[in-house]
């Protein structure tokens, strides 16, 4: 694994792979953060030597603002992170709530799914024709549910 990382680092250091190096920096930085912060990140980017975190919710932004010193400390002290992010010369770290949050998942069907347990084999002893017709309709519905 270390050999693969060293080969990858060699290739990433070339200028044509600047975006790959940037993504490596972001991936390592995200791994170094606490899990509570990792869950809130939508995306990361660098602009004008400022590292921006786009977060999902204002609560995550508050947590990022509270832990900005931790993030700055990680950038300056962790050797793999320092090496991967040195090309960006990051001087500041900011977080903001993104309006590009992922769309909520569509709720599944709320119609209950069950198998028909009745057999529809009952006799109708009603005297009224309307009631007999209603029971016959119920028998047909049960039959349809048994054999969809």
Image: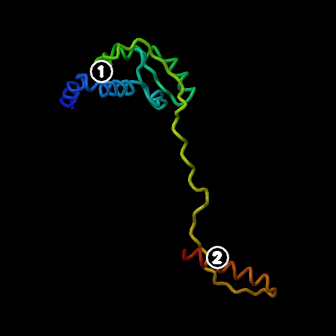
Badge 2 crowding class, 10 Å Cα cut-off, few under 14, some 14 to 19, many 20 or more, is: few
**Residue 84 marker:** 1
> Which quadrant, please, contains the C terminus?
bottom right
SS at mark 2 in the image: helix
* Residue at horizontal 50 percent and vertical 21 percent from the top: 95
The x, y position of residue 47, in whole percent, is: 42, 18
Quarter of the image where one finds residue 125: bottom right
SS at mark 1 in the image: helix
* Residue at horizontal 52 percent and vertical 18 percent from the top: 65
Badge 1 crowding class, 10 Å Cα cut-off, few under 14, some 14 to 19, many 20 or more, is: many
Question: For this view, does 63 lie left or right of residue 6?
Answer: right
The x, y position of residue 30, in whole percent, is: 39, 27
Question: For this view, does 44 lie left or right of residue 77?
Answer: right
Between the residue at mark 2 and the residue at mark 1, the CA separation in whole angstroms equals 67 Å
Question: For this view, does 122 lie left or right of residue 41?
Answer: right
User: For the residues carrying marks 2 and 1, which lies nearer the camera in this image?
Assistant: 1
The residue at the far right in this view is: 128
Q: Which residue is mark 2?
A: 141
Tags 2 and 1 touching, CB below 8 Å: no
């Amino acid at each position: 694994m270390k050999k693969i990382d060293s080969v990858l680092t060699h290739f990433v250091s070339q200028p044509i792979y600047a975006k790959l190096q940037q993504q490596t920096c972001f991936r390592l930085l995200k791994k170094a953060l606490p899990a509570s912060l990792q869950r809130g990140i939508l995306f990361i980017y660098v602009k004008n030597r400022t590292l921006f975190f786009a977060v999902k919710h204002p609560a995550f932004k508050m947590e990022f603002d509270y832990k900005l010193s931790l993030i700055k400390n990680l950038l300056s002290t962790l050797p793999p992170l320092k090496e991967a992010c040195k090309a960006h010369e990051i001087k500041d770290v900011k977080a903001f709530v993104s309006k590009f949050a992922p769309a909520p998942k569509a709720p599944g069907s709320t119609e209950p799914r069950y198998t028909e347990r009745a057999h529809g084999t009952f006799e109708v002893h009603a005297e009224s024709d309307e009631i007999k017709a209603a029971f016959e309709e119920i028998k047909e519905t049960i039959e349809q549910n048994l054999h969809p």
